[in-house]
Image: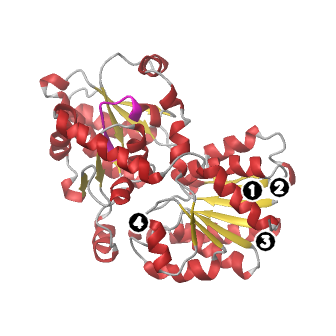
Amino acid sequence: MKYYIIAGEASGDLHGSNLMKGLYEEDPEAVIRFWGGDLMNGVCRERQHCHEGGGGLVRHYRDGAIMGFWEVLTHAGKLLGNVAFCKKDILGWKPDAVILIDYPGFNFKIAEFAHKHGIRTFYYIAPKVWASREGRIRKLKEYVDKLYIVFPFEIPYFKSKGVDATYLGNPLVDSISSSRAMNESRKEFLERNGLEDKPVIALLAGSRKGEISTMMPVLTRFAAKMQAIGKYKDYQFIVAGAPARSMDDYAGYIAEADTKYGKTGIKVLFGETLSVIRHAEAAVVNSGTASLETVLLGTPQVVGYICNKLTYLIAKHIVKIRYISLGNLVVDRLAFRELIQNDCNADNLVAEVRKLIEDRQYREKMLEEYEEIRKALGGRGSSRAVAASMYKELAGK
């Protein structure tokens, strides 16, 4: 079978890479052409015949990852150009199925196009219509042949809307359990990265350039304030560099902080996100997939999120959910704190991180909540199960 996969951001690249592994295992003749990132491309390169028959990477997600109403509006020309290119590419290659991974602004346009041209369309990781833009449910019903969801709370929601959705577990469970981070010692992590044997606080500023530009000034000020407290002066503050980003995306903010507050000693590590989180005493995490990864890795966290003011004002009127973090949504309560917009400032982060580290009862309660989230997500094997289901759908088995 020929599969055309579209993942538009870092989390989609992760889930897409695991799905590709499953497709190659279930369908030995699989040829996969895709929009994604380094992880999906890495899976492809492991296959001896990956590029035969037109398989391989079409475009990297870093060329189009945009989030937020204002941001999408200001980049509309580029997005439309990518959509037009993608449609042409699909028609030219003639896949047996188009597989869309989240990224709804782009992928709904492709779903409609594929449907009109008689191409089977699978949507993997449902767009968050339960949070906003519920009108998109009509498009799911009309343009998508099969919807695969990854959160248990989505089961009753989609059923109530008349959408036939399939839940086969959450792919992050596989990703985390098999990761290097969960199968190495702290000593190995420190030695590999030339770090001292001192406590670590993980800083995750998001994967998009816009997120980094809003979070890094807050995170650097937070680190400086923490270091000014005697017991934290020797802590290591490590930014987990996002995939497809470079040191240029972080260096300016760190240099500015060093000038303002004195040497902060903030380090940036690339390709080590899960290990940075796993071996940290606590983590400050930009909302998104990383917050759920932090739950599965077992590190106490606080979520911080800042977006464009116009985007925030619009979101306040259309977003229907009480929480922005996936882990909190799974248990429908605040398992860990969320600091949004003006509340996401250095002083609040200092107070919360100190509580995570110094208040043993508070810390243990959060870890108990983590265990409930893990149980709700289910066990391993999700990606392979989804791949098997897709293959059976296409093969008529």
Vertical position of residue 340 compared to residue 371: above or below: below
What SS does tag 4 mark? loop
What label does residue 54 carry, if any?
Answer: 2
What label does residue 91 carry, if any?
Answer: 3
Coordinates of residue 65 in the picture (x, y in percent): 52, 58
Distance between the Cα atoms at labels 2 and 4? Answer: 33 Å
Tell me if label 2 and label 1 are in contact, CB under 8 Å: yes
Drawn side of residue 335 relative to residue 162, left or right: left
Drawn side of residue 175 relative to residue 321, left or right: right
Give the residue at mark 1: 33
Q: Earlier in the sequence, mark 2 or mark 1?
A: 1
Q: Which span of residues is magenta-colored?
A: 277-285
Q: Can see residue 327?
A: yes
Question: Which of the pair 361/285 is nearer the observer?
Answer: 361
Kindly identify the amino acid type of the residue bearing the numbered disc 3: Leu
Distance between the Cα atoms at labels 2 and 3? Answer: 13 Å
